[in-house]
Structure formats: structure tokens, C-alpha cells
Amino acid sequence: MIGKPAARPRVPRFSSGPCAKRPGWSLDALGGASLGRSHRAKAGKNKLKDAIDGTREVLQVPAEYRIGIVPASDTGAVEMAMWSLLGPRPVDMLAWESFGEGWVTDAVKQLRLDARIVKAGYGELPDLSAVDTKTRDVVFTWNGTTSGVRVPDAEWIAADREGLTICDATSAAFSQRLDWPKLDVVTFSWQKALGGEAAHGMLVLSPRAVARLESHVPAWPLPKIFRMTSGGKLIEGIFQGETINTPSMLCVEDYLDALAWAKRAGGLEGLIARSDANAGALLGWVERTPWVANLARDPATASNTSVCLTIADPDVTAKGPEAVAAFAKGSAARRETEGVALDIGAYRDAPAGLRIWCGATVESSDVEALLPWLDWAYEAEKAKLLPRAA
């Protein structure tokens, strides 16, 4: 059995959401928050508008697309889009991990849409050529947060489509390049890629999505927090910082700080490069380590943010799924007890293993320092499970 490594990650936070704060963050960064005042006062509205403008700049969102701050994180933003926009056309629902499955449930069991489900198991991507992006609406996740599998690009989406594409991009935004001309609705949250505080979602609408909003009346009642039109016209204020409900101005300040850091880090190109470097360090270790494997089977679809790993040691897997799950949980607990890796267990619905966030707010030096601890915890847990084999 190997001994404990000497070096430790400076920041052991590798959670896939909420994610690590930006390097050098402290509470002092929130000193300028507009607290104890109405978010509808000039100071608050300016902060909210700055958050929208900063998002547009960093993500390189086209000028004609609207950006709004909406309630209930990415979940609220996706459901706001689905409840408001779907219905006029049949819809293809893509699912290859738990969050995509959640949107399928909304479409089939709640909205009862004319929906076709295009699915794949954990570690794989559905057959994108089977998706009708020409005549049907499409709902999909760009990056499967709980499977570590992402779409490689948007080439499979028809440029002359008649329907809308609704993209849950919450673990892709700020770390992967989104093909805006192919996307009509994009959603994400502050607490994923930039490590912001929770509860707020971002909703980005193309002109085509706005046209649908202004021409389509859903067949079901819409809660107040989902309503984006009045009298058949878009409520433009939502996309200028006049939020539907009261936002946390402390969270807004934190997001503004994260956006400012993102600009200093080189904008979108710099953030993608940081994420690629982090994932590269981790996946390089996976390639030379026989006891672990990337859940994403095709390197072309492997995530550079939520990297999901499985136990590949036949001595462990031969014990059966329950033993593998206990092994993964035990080794993760060892790393957490040592304070070197927090919250890196696989998502509860995913295959047992590890999920390590490699987004831009993580430092490559911390990923490198983590790797020997992954081996140490594996060896320690194997010695417990199989004393003679260890």
C-alpha cells in the first residue's frame, strides 16, 4: 500500500455544483453589494443590468439575443422555457443522464406533449442523426453534468430549422463554446461554471424564440414566475434587469465578481483553455491508471468540466454493483476526511465512481496535487475490501 502523498491541493473543492469559487475569492469581494435596498431602485437595476451585459460579453452572445435573470436556478430557466414555448410542434427530447431525464418527465408526464424520446445510457450520446431538428422542437443538455458526456458540436442541428432548440447549458457555459446561431434558448446557472451563489438562472432567447413567445398561447396555465409576455408582447424589462421576483443582491454581486475575474482570465477563450488544461491533467492520469476509467466512452464527447470516472479494477468489479458502490463511497470519504477532495462522489443516479469538476475556476496545480491522493485512497480502500490482493 502506498503512503500518504506529501503535497495537498491548495483548494480541495471539486464539487460539480455549487462549484469552486474563482481563484483568490474572499468575502471582501462582495463589499459593494446593494444590500437593504429595493432591487428596483436605480442602484439595484444597474447591478442587474451589469450582470446581463457582462454575461453577453464573456459568453459572446449575439446582440440580437435577449438575456434575462430568472428564478430557481437552471431548473427554473429550463422549465420556464418549456412551459412557455413548447406545444405548437412535436418535440424531440434528448436524454443521456439524470437532468435530461428530468426534462423528459416534464414534457411527457406534466405537459403531455407530442414528444419523441431519443435516449442513451450513461457514458454514451444518443444517435444525433435520429433527431429531427428540421421540423420538430428539440430539448437537450449540451453537457450531461452527471454522465460527463457532451455533444461535440452543433453540426447536427439544421441551420434552416423550423422548430426551436432549447439547450440546458448549465455545465457547459463558460467552459465550452456554444454555437449560438443553432440555439434558440440557452439556460444556465451562476453556481456551476463560475462558482457563483445559487438560486438564480439565466435565460437567453434568440429572435426566433421571442417570435414564438409572442405568437403562441400555451394550452396550460402559466405561473406568474414563468410569464414573459403581456398582451401578446415580450416583457422587455425582464431582459434589462427588471426581474420577475426579488433576487439576492448579495448573489448578484458575487456573480459580477465572477464575471470580472472571467474577463481578467482571458474571457471565453481563457476560460475554455483553463478547463481543457484541468480536464487534460485528470484524463492523462486516467489513461495511465488501470483501476479507473472515464465514464464517457468516446473521447470526442468527453466533458472538460464534470469529468465522471468509474472503477475499472476487475478485483473490485467482480464483487458486484453494491460492493463497487461501497468501494467508491468509502474511497471518496477517505479523501474528504483528509481534506484533499470534497464532494467528488458520483451523482446518486449515475454509475458508482467519481465526479471531479474541472471547470475554469479550478487551478491545474490543484488537479495535479489531487491525483496521488486518488491513488492513495483507492489503495487504502482496496486493502480493506481485499486484504490479500492489496
Image (cartoon, rainbow, N blue to C red):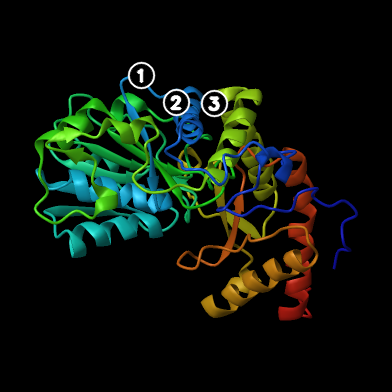
Name the spot of residue 294 as percent of width and height, x first.
56, 52
In the picture, the disc for residue 263 is none
Q: Which comes before the other along the chain, label 2 or label 3?
A: 2
Query: Does residue 22 show up?
Result: no
The N terminus is located in which quarter?
Answer: bottom right
Which is more foreground, mark 1 or mark 3?
1
The alpha-carbon separation of the residues under discs 2 and 3 comes to 11 Å
In-image side of 242 versus 370 (left or right): left
Pick the quarter of the image with the C terminus: bottom right
Identify the residue at image location x=51%, y=32%: 43
Alpha-carbon span between mark 1 and mark 2: 8 Å
- Residue at figure coordinates x 61%, y 55% from the top left: 15
Label 1 residue SS? loop
Element carrying mark 3: helix
Circles 1, 2 touching at the beta carbon (< 8 Å):
yes
- Residue that mark 1 sits on: 63
Identify the residue position indicated by label 2 in the image.
56
* Total numbered badges shown on the rendered structure: 3
Question: Image quarter for residue 214?
Answer: top left
Q: Amino acid at mark 2?
A: Arg
